[in-house]
Image: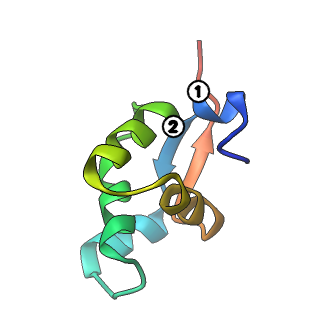
Amino acid sequence: MDLNHATALHAIPQRTPLADDELGTRTGKLSQRHRTALLLIDGRRTVAQVLSLCELAGATRTHLEQLVSEGFVQLQERRA
């Protein structure tokens, strides 16, 4: 899903087991900025909220997009 799409900004990003494994073992697959973005994902914040926090922490939209494309993060539609 394209993070520029309005629907994606309201989605809830979720860490996958791959992400949890990477955070726990630090195998070196991810940069510090990628790890920062992963740590900001709590299963409650929307993509828009995570992106705002990422910018404050030095991570970018590209870092989050890469995490999604590489299977570390999946997007869940926000339930009303």
Give the residue at x 30% y 60%.
Answer: 36
Q: Callout 2, which amino acid?
A: Val
**Residue 53 percent coordinates (x, y):** 33, 40
Q: Residue tagged by mark 1?
A: 10
Q: Residue tagged by mark 2?
A: 47
> Left or right of 75: which side holds 17?
left
Q: Which of 12 and 30 is in front in this view?
A: 30
Disc 1 crowd, CA 10 A, few/some/many (<14, 14-19, 20+): some
Give the residue at x 36% y 75%.
Answer: 22
**Residue 14 percent coordinates (x, y):** 48, 47
> In the image, which disc is placed on residue 50?
none
Disc 2 crowd, CA 10 A, few/some/many (<14, 14-19, 20+): many
Looking at the picture, does residue 61 appear above or below residue 42? Answer: below
Looking at the picture, does residue 39 appear above or below residue 80? Answer: below
> Left or right of 69: which side holds 45?
left
Marks 1/2 in contact by CB < 8 Å: the verdict is yes
Here the colouring is rainbow
**Residue 76 percent coordinates (x, y):** 61, 38
Give the residue at x 59% y 19%.
Answer: 79
**Residue 13 percent coordinates (x, y):** 51, 43
For the residue labelled by badge 2, is the local secondary structure a helix, a strand or a loop? Answer: helix
Q: In which quarter of the image is the C terminus?
A: top right
CA–CA distance in space, label 1 to label 2: 6 Å
Q: Callout 1, which amino acid?
A: His
> Left or right of 1: which side holds 25?
left
Q: N-terminal of the two: label 1 or label 2?
A: 1
